Amino acid sequence: MKRVSLVFTLALAAAFSTEAATAQTLKTVKDRGMLSCGVSQGLPGFSSPDDKGNWTGFDVDICRAIAAAIFNDATKIKFVPLSAKDRFTALQSGEIDVLSRNTTWTLSRDTSLGANFTGVTYYDGQGFLVKKSLKVNSALELNSASVCVQTGTTTEQNLADYFKGNNMKYEVIAFGTADETIKAYESGRCDVFTSDVSQLYAERLKVANPADHVVLPEVISKEPLGPMVRHGDDQWFDIVKWTLFAMVGAEELGITQKNADELAKSNKPELRRAFGTDGNLGEQLGLTKDWLLRIVKAVGNYGESFDRNVGPGSKLGIARGLNQLWNKGGIQYAPPIR
């Protein structure tokens, strides 16, 4: 019996030792004084800089929320623009602390890259952008089309599966960056541009006459997009994961940027837990009790960020669709904050 107890004690000690050795990202970020966030090289609505280098977008807001939770300052971030090809290497090497760059969660990426997805920020799917002058109303009319794609993404395999499944021929014309891809499409080097539907709406804003182009109705894949962190640091994984959940949970609880301070005075049990006036949930993450209040005051709840960056309040004008809350007809859902 004593031997079993000793083995258990040693195993427990080893587990705590491993956790202590790997839970370093938060300390590194604090010591550095800023978060290093990997983003796109410029995708309107998700992550793009203005002419003064100020970054905005849905993916950017996730990083601002993390910085707000840690520093109570959403500006303490270094944004690192990355191509689709280089994004995973930057995370693996430690150049960035989190990758928040319209990246699809797949089994192979979750197991072969030394990284973990922390949740789904945007439920998306692959589609097709065509010129209206082509007079195509369905992707099923694209037999023998030339298709522009960006390398290093999930789109090529989805494209092959769709055309093979529908006994259609096609020609792939691949490019290294999103800008190269949309420019090639606009110049007529291909008939069709395929990517995630959200990206098609964003890239369409870059062409000379966006109204001359249409996104076809077919959605040919599941593309759950979300942030990634490196394997081996469960505390950091929890912080990034629960930052997203805090934004979703805040929307469900009716907490907004405008009313957050007022609701923080509420006696409702679920609000007291969320705001840290009851319990120590924030401290369990390695943050402060008011971590959720910091997040919502800095970037708003999930719905506010969605509407401002990609929804009705933005140039993209994308409907919430699947990204609506679970109790409003969508599938966006966060575990309870308790």
Image: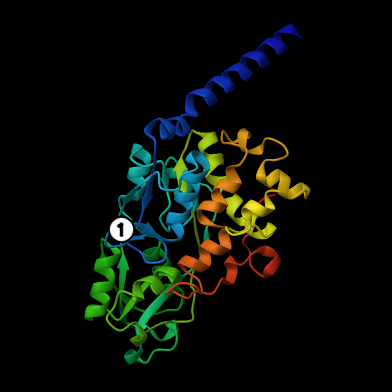
- Which amino acid, by three-letter code, is at mark 1? Gln
Residue 123 visible somewhere in the drawing: no
| Image x and y of residue 123, in percent | 53, 64
Most foreground residue, 166 or 86:
86
| Image x and y of residue 262, in percent | 67, 54
Looking at the rendered structure, the number of numbered marks drawn on it comes to 1
Most foreground residue, 224 or 299:
299
Q: State which quarter of the image contains the C terminus.
A: top right
- The 10 Å Cα crowd at callout 1, few under 14, some 14 to 19, many 20 or more, is some
Q: Please give the name of the residue rendered at 60% of the width and 50% of the height, measured from the top-left corner.
A: 246
| Image x and y of residue 297, in percent | 55, 52
Q: Please give the name of the residue rendered at 52% of the width and 57% of the height, measured from the top-left corner.
A: 121
| Image x and y of residue 271, in percent | 72, 49
Most foreground residue, 199 or 158:
199
**Image height of 247 relative to 233, above or below:** below
**Image height of 80 relative to 164, above or below:** above
Q: State which quarter of the image contains the N terminus.
A: top right
Q: Please give the name of the residue rendered at 31% of the width and 62% of the height, measured from the top-left corner.
A: 50
Q: Which residue lies furthest to the top in this view?
A: 2
**Left or right: 87, with 2 as reference point:** left
Question: Which residue does the numbered mark 1 point to in the structure image?
Answer: 41
Secondary structure at numbered mark 1: loop
Residue 197 visible somewhere in the drawing: yes
- The answer to which image quadrant residue 41 occupies is bottom left
Most foreground residue, 163 or 70:
70
**Left or right: 116, with 259 as reference point:** left
